[in-house]
Amino acid sequence: MTETDETTGPPVTLIDAIDMSKLDPKFREKIKSMPNGEALAACFACSTCTAACPTANMWKFKPHQLIRMILLGMREEVLSSNEIWLCLTCYECQERCPQKVRVTDIFFDCKNLAAEEGNIPANVLALAKELLTKGQLYTVTADWEREDMGLEPEVPGLSVEAIKRILKDTRTKKLVGGEE
Amino acid sequence: MIKVSDPVLIIGAGVAGMTAAVELADSGIKTVLVEKLSTTGGNALNLYKAFPTDDCFYCFEGNRWRPGIRKCFYRSALTEQPNIDLRMNSQVEEITGAAGKFSIKLDIGPQYVDPKKCTMCGLCIEKSKAFSLVSPQCQPQAVSFDPEIEDEGTAVAAEKCPTKAINLEAKGTKITINVSDIIIATGYHEMKPVNVDEYGYGTHPNIITQLELAQILDPLGETKGTLLKPSDGKPAKHVMMVQCVGSRDENYYPYCSKICCVYALKHAAILTQEREGVDVSVVYMDIRTYDRHEKYYRDTREAGVEFVRGRVASIEPQKDDSLAIIVYDSLLDKYLKFSVDLFVLSSALEPSPGSSQIIESLGLKSASGFIGATNPETEVVVGNRIYACGSALGPSEVPESVTQARAVVSKILQNRK
């Protein structure tokens, strides 16, 4: 009965299982300890978040799956996933969650953790650099809409220099680098 | 015409049967309470802590309304209430006669130990293996004797018993009684899932059922409440439970066994909150912690119990005595591989062995093998002057069994002038 010969039974060659012992059990606690993670464990995987999401249709991992992956300790997969950056941050998921899990905010926490590890998609990185160097994301040039409405073409009082100075001391600067 | 004094037969002294007996007796009605085992309490006695109060069920919240009586009043009432005729180690052999004047043939087991004299001092248990104490909470409060394993110490034990409570010459008897009403309270039986091959029950000592786990968790049990592996007596750290083993399964029992989600999570809560360094995963199809029991689900998630929606793909015993278990996670659409020390099956709750016989002999309705109501509006009425309560009607929680027993008592009292 206690025969423990591992060769008994056919080997499960067709199943490529995720080895739970190779995952990071502390990841769940890490997210839980972050500002938005308190209710993380309350998730019962009803998938309301995925139903609410306007873009999850395009995602490889849906929102409810990402939360499951966090709970299971799949740190690598979550932090390197594209999905956390594809989130529109519309907060529909968080609004509807029956267990008050702060889904959108948890994805922000994930993005922060990913960024700490230098895991930032190129387009987001480019935007951050733009912000650091120009002090604004979109430079408003003589805008016909403003003109049509009888406003002066330049946005008045936009102090990009002050913002650039402030941004130098921020975490964004540390993560993104860029010219001094 | 039924007289107030006409006796009532109650089959089974579990939660429902005991409640019905005590409440009828208190209303002045003679009851004959027949139990085939040597202690009352039924399955509830083996659950360690019973939900929803997590008390030992004898002290169940529902009894508090009786002022001036200690909470576990059922225990003394069963032997001291003059209107209750408690028949242990006994079975109903035959039921004949019409409603209102049933004739019952009883097979009364021999009473080797007189519960009125036994002080449970333990002397006989020291002298002979044939004596044992089922539980310190057993009722009647007395040791049990098994003549099958009589040894050289048995006679000495009987001789030395300080209160002369042991009579080795005791014989069983057959008696016939007349009763006006019959209450069926035969409870449930936890299926031994030997036939559900994929879970390997019976092929490895560390694959057990929930009721077997309850025995390991019970401080009065063999391991004194420590979570030890049956295989080698070493601590178990990783526990996996799987729900719906034989329930909601057309190959076994098509119904939901209703209370296994709640007691599985009760066990998961005990393991994660009251034991050191134990983690629990629960593999499920649906978690059915109905009604207020949702609290167990929420609390165990908070406590870090890992819920995996899906089914078990394979179980491989390893050289280090662990079980390598692959689970298909249907939410992730991935297979997960776990290393598990103790694999606990939430096995289906089936009708007790005698149910089909009772249904057949009394011409009752069957509801998936349990006793069926004649009219769905009066659940406890199953025939003419025949009633059922508790898990004889289908898996029930303790408060529900108590409520149904009281409904039966009310029906019987309404029929008497």
Image: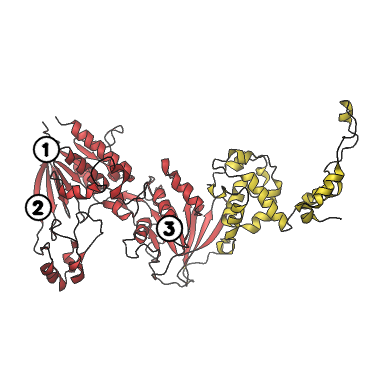
Q: Are marks 3 and 2 on the same chain?
A: yes
Q: What element carries label 1?
A: loop
Callout 1: chain: B
| Three-letter code, disc 2 | Lys
The residue closer to the viewer here, B121 or B223, is B121
The hue of chain A in the figure is yellow
Residue picked out by circle 2: B174
Q: Does residue A9 appear left or right of residue B17 in this picture?
A: right
State the image coordinates of residue B133 (x, y, percent, origin top left): 23, 62
- Dot 3 alpha-carbon crowd within 10 angstroms: few under 14, some 14 to 19, many 20 or more: few
Name the residue carrying label 1: B6
* Chain B display color: red
Badge 1 density bin: few <14, some 14–19, many ≥20, Cα 10 Å: some
The answer to whether any part of residue A81 appears in the image is: no
N-term mark: 3 or 2? 2
- Please report contact status of discs 2 and 1: CB closer than 8 Å, yes or no: no
Position of A42 with respect to A108 (left or right) is: left
- Chain letter of mark 3 equals B
The residue that disc 3 covers is B274
